[in-house]
Amino acid sequence: MTDLVEPQERKTVIITGASRGIGHYTARMFLERGWKIITCSREDTPEECKRDRNWTRHIPTDLGDSASLDNFIREANAVLGDAPLHGLVNNAGMSPKTPFKERLGCLNGDLKAWHDVFELNFFAPLRLSRGFASALHRGKGAIVNVTSIAGHAIHPFAGSAYSISKAALSALTREMANEFAALDVRVNAVAPGEIETEMVGPEYEVLIPRIPLDRMGSPKDVAGTVFFLCSDDSQYVTGTEVWVTGGQHMF
């Protein structure tokens, strides 16, 4: 069975950080499978994407800025009106470096930068989930938080601020699954490993021997798992974090 539906029954999903990498592949996958999408990122919509009639609305947004995030919730809810929302994919995230090109660690980096990481990687998913709770309730929908393998074990390149924010998002997923169940809304997470995106540099090649499948993953691998967790095929799945790591998380 596929998740394709007739136009009058077309489902709607909101995807953050949709301009590139995992977010962009995820948006394309939902479009290809007949869903309407509402997206946000710091950038405007690419011209080629504007031609897709299912791409309902793209709202340029800085989710690390409270006013911009609130405006996104307001505009997206206005687009939805009284219609149901069937999925919310909290994909946007950041892993900044210090001026010396180091990841933010416990002994280095401005603590203000740590706050910025948590604002985007942790608080934004919480605020978005609250902001779309009513629409998700109408659609008996699903929330998918994109976490990371780095939230569960020391990672040589991720940095402490990023890793800890993703560990917090994993815990938030569990707590949200418990509370949002009262709204008939499922909450799960996807934890990618080494995925070939703009965030991954040449240094990541040394990690491939640690991956049982002996290769890095693609954004499509993550997008397929996100889609499954939003689809009717996972109606009895909540409070789960799915590893998309090629087996790397086992070691």
Image: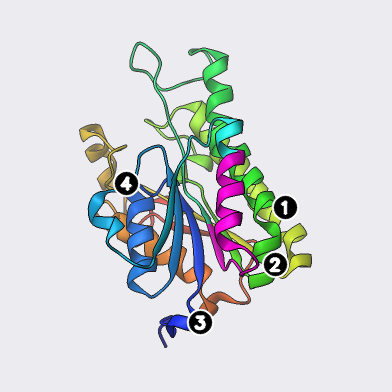
Q: Specify the quadrant of the image occupied by residue 2.
A: bottom left
Find residue 9 and name its label. 3
Instruction: Look at the image and tell me whether residue 250 can be seen.
Output: no
- Tell me the crowding category of disc 4: few under 14, some 14 to 19, or many 20 or more residues within 10 angstroms, Cα based: some
Mark 2 vs 1, N-terminal side: 2
Where does the image place residue 169, in percent across and percent down from the top left? 60, 44
Where does the image place residue 48, in percent across and percent down from the top left? 23, 55
Residue type at tag 3? Glu
Mark 3 vs mark 2: give the one in front: 3
Find residue 20 and name its label. 4
Q: CA distance from mark 4 to mark 2?
A: 29 Å
Q: On screen, 170 above or below 81?
A: above
- Tell me the crowding category of disc 2: few under 14, some 14 to 19, or many 20 or more residues within 10 angstroms, Cα based: many
| Residue wearing tag 1 | 175
Q: On screen, 72 above or below 143?
A: above
- Tell me the crowding category of disc 1: few under 14, some 14 to 19, or many 20 or more residues within 10 angstroms, Cα based: few
Mark 2 vs mark 1: give the one in front: 2
Span colored in magenta: 70-88
> Measuring 54% from the left and 38% from the top, which residue is drawn there?
121
Residue type at tag 2? His
In this view, the residue in front, 100 or 3, is 3
Mark 3 vs 2, N-terminal side: 3
Q: Secondary structure at mark 4?
A: loop
Q: Secondary structure at mark 1?
A: helix
Mark 4 vs 1, N-terminal side: 4
> Measuring 66% from the left and 63% from the top, which residue is drawn there?
135
Mark 3 vs mark 1: give the one in front: 3
Q: CA distance from mark 3 to mark 2?
A: 17 Å
